[in-house]
Amino acid sequence: MELYDPSVIRAIRNKYGFQFSRSLGQNFLTDKGVIDGIVDGAEIGPEDLVIEIGPGIGVLTCAAAEKAGRVVAIEIDERLIRILADTLAGYDNIRVINENVVKMDLASLISEEAGVKYKHVKIIGNLPYYITTTILMKLLESHLPVESITVMMQKEVAERIKEPPGSRVYGALSVAVQYYCEVSVVEEVPREVFLPAPKVDSTVLRLDMRPEPPVSLLDEAMFFRCVRAGFGQRRKTLLNSLTGAGFSKDAIRACLEKAGIDPRQRAETLSLQNFAAIANGFVTGENG
Ligand SMILES: C[S@@+](CC[C@H](N)C(=O)[O-])C[C@H]1O[C@@H](n2cnc3c(N)ncnc32)[C@H](O)[C@@H]1O
């Protein structure tokens, strides 16, 4: 019997007296096709160092370890560490770390682990839903030497990430992820394949880190300042919302005019190129 079999998961729960923690987003995968979909979607091979976020009882960890050079799995729940020591006992290429991924120094972990042995570093996971955005932003903003991030998340969050400008759900998260990565859908996953079943469906996205940003910026921090201000008050016109970035209305008017953008537009209509033109306009305006 396999680890992802619901009766095995229940047996593990009974053996260790383990109760699922809803607050830690513990919904364990029970479907081999979905697990293989993540591993295949990430194109894991023997030259890869794989970092897994939230291994749970290790279903995805085992599948990744069959193909990867090495897997490092980061799990916050101490109760699962004892279980993982048993479920992963047959593998010699897995390391489990009992840590909160949001607080970890991932750059140091990767440089310690990758060395010269592994050509590619890939991140995978069935992310805890309560903290998906925080984890993703941490991974992206840390500028890690990572090739791709292939992770499952709530379907609605995946939609926010991949939608283009003009869509109802396009926002700061879409701009940030699309700035750092090329986004593709690996698979859609119904709620029934988890134990316990969550109240939402899921999507596995693959985020391929871009070697170069898709827009040229004078100051990356200014770009994100404008994005945050624009979407911080997304119902307001740009003329009003961009005051949140600390600029006067006159400066905003001048900058938007130079960028060829109507001050009555809203942030949700702006492409990455538009945000870049605005941010670069503010930088040159400040310096000149
Ligand atoms: C949705 S479950 C996925 C479990 C397993 N990978 C699977 O697919 O069956 C999310 C896992 O992330 C762990 N987790 C939650 N918050 C975490 C954090 N901040 N850092 C590391 N792991 C976390 C949970 O304890 C849980 O094991």
Image: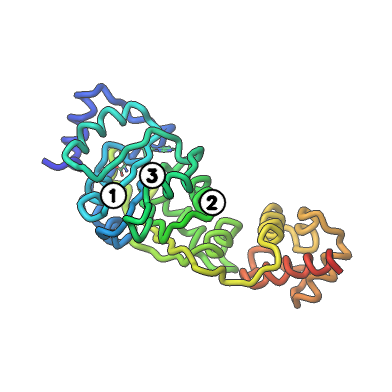
Mark 3 closeness class: few <14, some 14–19, many ≥20 residues within 10 Å: many
In the image, taking residue 115 as reference, residue 159 lies left or right, namely right
The verdict on label 2 being within 8 Å of ligand 1 is: no
The verdict on label 1 being within 8 Å of ligand 1 is: no
Instruction: Give the amino acid at mark 3.
Output: Ile
Decide if residue 107 is in sight here: yes
Instruction: Name the residue located 80 percent from the left edge and 63 percent from the top edge.
Output: 239
Pointer 3: what residue? Answer: 53
Ligand 1 location (quadrant)? top left
Residue 167 lies, with reference to residue 56, above or below; the image says below
Residue 59 lies, with reference to residue 280, above or below; the image says above
- Of the numbered discs 2 and 1, the one sitting upstream in the chain is 1
- Of the numbered discs 1 and 3, the one sitting upstream in the chain is 3
Pointer 1: what residue? Answer: 70
Instruction: Name the residue located 86 percent from the left edge and 65 percent from the top edge.
Output: 251
Residue 12's spot in the image, x, y percent? 20, 30
Residue 204's spot in the image, x, y percent? 37, 56
Pointer 2: what residue? Answer: 142
**Residue 206 picture quarter:** bottom left
Residue 75 lies, with reference to residue 170, above or below; the image says above
**Screen quadrant of the N terminus:** top left
**Residue 229 picture quarter:** bottom right
Instruction: Name the residue located 31 percent from the left edge and 26 percent from the top edge.
Output: 19
Residue 108's spot in the image, x, y percent? 47, 45
